[in-house]
Amino acid sequence: MQKIAVFPGSFDPITKGHESIVKRALLLFDKIYIVIAINENKKPLFPLDKRLKWIKKVFGNENNIIVDTYNGLIVDYCNKINAKYIIRGLRTSADFEYERAIAQANRFLDSSIETIFFLTAPEFTPINSTIVREIIRYGGDVSKFVPDGINVYE
C-alpha cells in the first residue's frame, strides 16, 4: 500500500520553507499531493493559476508530487485520493497550538488520517507567506524567501 500524503495550504506565495518541508517529506512518502486551499474567507494576493504554476515549476521534476486545488474539508479530499497523512509545517510554538487544534478536529472527523508535523529548518523559521506578501506589496526583494526561479513580479 502506497503512503500518500497531502500538504495543504494557500501557498500565497510558495516559500523556501514550504519547499524544504516537501523535499524532506519526499523521503517518507510515496506520493505527495500539494493542494492549494480555496478559502472564500481569504483574499489571496496572487491568483490561483499563478500559484499552481509556481508550485509546478518548483516540483516539476518530481514524479511523485501532484499539484491540485480543493474547496472543503481536507479529510474529505484525503479520502477522495486515499491519502492517510496530512503534512503540516511548524515554525513556532504559536504555529503548534493552531495546527494542533486543526489536527485534532481532523482526527475527530476521520480517525484514519494522521497529521504529521515537520519542524521548519532553522534558516526558514522567520519566513512566512504573510511577511513575504508584505514585502511584495512594497516592492521589496523576496528572492531570499521564495524558491529559486520564482519571480513574483512577473
Image (spheres, helix red, strand yellow):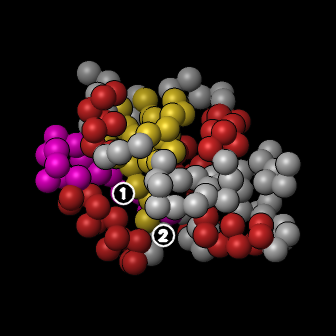
- Res 78 visible: yes
Characterize the local packing of mark 2: few (<14), some (14-19) or many (20 or more) Cα atoms within 10 angstroms. Answer: some
| Residue 16, image quadrant | bottom right
- Image quadrant holding the N terminus, namely top left
| Residue 12, image quadrant | bottom right
Circle 1 sits on which residue?
117
Q: Would residue 119 be counted in the magenta stretch? A: yes
- Could you tell me residue 46's position as x and y percent? 68, 53
Q: Would residue 75 be counted in the magenta stretch? A: no
- Could you tell me residue 100's position as x and y percent? 28, 66
Question: Which three-letter amino acid code belongs to the residue tagged 1?
Answer: Phe
Q: Which structural element holds mark 2?
A: loop
Question: Which three-letter amino acid code belongs to the residue tagged 2?
Answer: Arg
Circle 2 sits on which residue?
91
Characterize the local packing of mark 1: few (<14), some (14-19) or many (20 or more) Cα atoms within 10 angstroms. Answer: some
Residue sitting at x 77%, y 67%: 136
Q: Where residue 55 is drawn, which disc sits there? A: none
Q: Which residues are magenta?
A: 106-120
Q: With respect to residue 88, does 85 lie above or below?
A: above
Image position of 141 (left or right of 28): right
- Res 55 visible: no
| Residue 143, image quadrant | bottom right
- The residue sitting at the bottom extreme is 94
- The residue sitting at the front extreme is 40
Residue sitting at x 65%, y 34%: 56
- Could you tell me residue 139's position as x and y percent? 85, 69
Q: CA distance from mark 2 to mark 1?
A: 10 Å
Q: Which structural element holds mark 1?
A: strand
Contact? badges 2 and 1 (CB < 8 Å): no
